[in-house]
Amino acid sequence: MTASVDLAWFTEARLGMFVHWGLYSLAARHEWVKNRERMTDAEYEPYFAHFDPDRYDPRAWARTAKAAGAGYVVLTAKHHDGFCLWDSALTDYTSMNTPFGRDAVAEFVDACRAEGLRVGLYYSLIDWHHPSFPVDGTHPQRDDEEFKAAAADRDIRDYQRYLHGQVRELLTGYGQIDYLFFDFSYTHRPDYWGGKGAADWDAENLLSMVRALQPNIIVNDRLGIPGDIVTPEQYQPLKPMERDGVPVAWEACQTLDGSWGYDRDNLDAKSPESLIKLLIDGVSKDGNLLLNVGPDGRGRLDATAQRTFDEIASWMDDHARSVHGAGPAPWQAPGDTRYTLRGDRLYVHLFSWPFKHLHLPGLAGKVGYAQLMADASELVPLHIDPHRVAQNTLMGALPDGTLTLQLPVQRPDSPVPVIELFLTDAP
């Protein structure tokens, strides 16, 4: 079931911030720590008893996202451990009953709105804490035979009522929610026995309820039935994505270091340059980037995350119009470059810096002016005799239709320099 929702704001934004934050942030060793370490509820309980993020400031998160050019932020209202960051009437396992004692979702929603950002909420379909969620290959106690025997009569229909009720709470208690990120269905995963999917979530009725409560909301594709967008995770598509041969809006979900939740000892951080390139590559293929941060147990972004987003902000300060509202271009970009197109302007993102000349096939006669975005300095086109033979210091003729630009020898001080081409006619 899909609806004709307006994706204009989503494709205009192109960049979003994902926030994974919860009890696992105190463990500081991956958001699946309960699963990985086969923890019982009792062993996981100390994180609930000590959840008191005294530096929680979602306005600071929102400002960081906005400065980096993000148009929306998505918060994990409930992750797989079942812990809820809002004042749910359906369970006591919420932030209200920790030493923190506050509705973190309410504060998050207000913070995003105050910064003019679209609001997204993540909701895990999995729940390792709920007494009616049947044990399967994702469950922390999947190898505990005594526990499995005691849980053998769990009825997924009881959990369905809880799941639907909590989604209703999130979509009726906080005003307009722009994006709902469900996670995840896994009947197709051989590595998880007892996998669950659309039938287990009663997905058709759940999505109907979501549409009725929030007609303008964007819903992702993880209910086991089609949604409004598709969400490749931790890989970059080779081309624009399709569903049944038809182009579809998409969003690549990427981490800074391979972990979604705060992972204190994980030092595998991607460079800001590599993440900027992921963003550009996605836009060139008509997609978005949802870039994750995992705030620590006190509620702050760690230094690496803050520095990374600050460097993205610095690049976006000069180059945002090559990203926001831009999309793929009809021409084949030269090697180690990416094109994005916005109206009558074509943007050439240089992943490596050529020596003196940049050759752009098929663009001769189509460009009225060219400049480096960083300083608006003109790049002069080079006109080469189409019959000239290469000799010594003379460049030979180029294929018909090739536009050649003269570049400075020194690369601009930017992770990814961008050339802005003013087209004589928009394609």
Image (cartoon, helix red, strand yellow):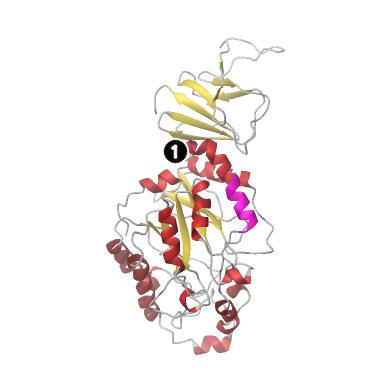
- Residue 340 covered by magenta stretch: no
Q: Residue at x 57, y 87 (%)?
A: 145
Q: Quadrant of the N terminus?
A: bottom left
The stretch of residues the image draws in magenta is 302-311
How packed mark 1 is, by other alpha carbons closer than 10 Å (few <14, some 14-19, many 20 or more), is: many
Taking 419 as reference, is 229 left or right? left
Q: Residue at x 66, y 30 (%)?
A: 411
Give the residue furthest to the right.
Answer: 392
Q: Quadrant of the C terminus?
A: top left
**Foreground: 191 or 111?**
111
- Residue 304 covered by magenta stretch: yes
Give the residue furthest to the front.
Answer: 54
Q: In the rendered view, would you say 197 is above or below 344?
A: below
Q: In the rendered view, would you say 249 is above or below 190?
A: above
Q: Name the chief secondary structure element in magenta.
A: helix
Instruction: From the image, tell me which residue sits under label 1.
Output: 326
Which amino acid type is marked by label 1? Ala
Q: In the rendered view, would you say 16 is above or below 406?
A: below
Q: Position of residue 125 (x, y in %)?
A: 44, 70
Taking 88 as reference, is 263 left or right? right
Taking 254 as reference, is 161 left or right? left
**Foreground: 395 or 52?**
52
Q: Which secondary structure, mark 1?
A: loop
Residue 290 seen in the figure: no
Q: Residue at x 59, y 59 (%)?
A: 301
Q: Position of residue 120 (x, y in %)?
A: 42, 58
Residue 391 seen in the figure: yes
Q: In the rendered view, would you say 332 is above or below 261?
A: above
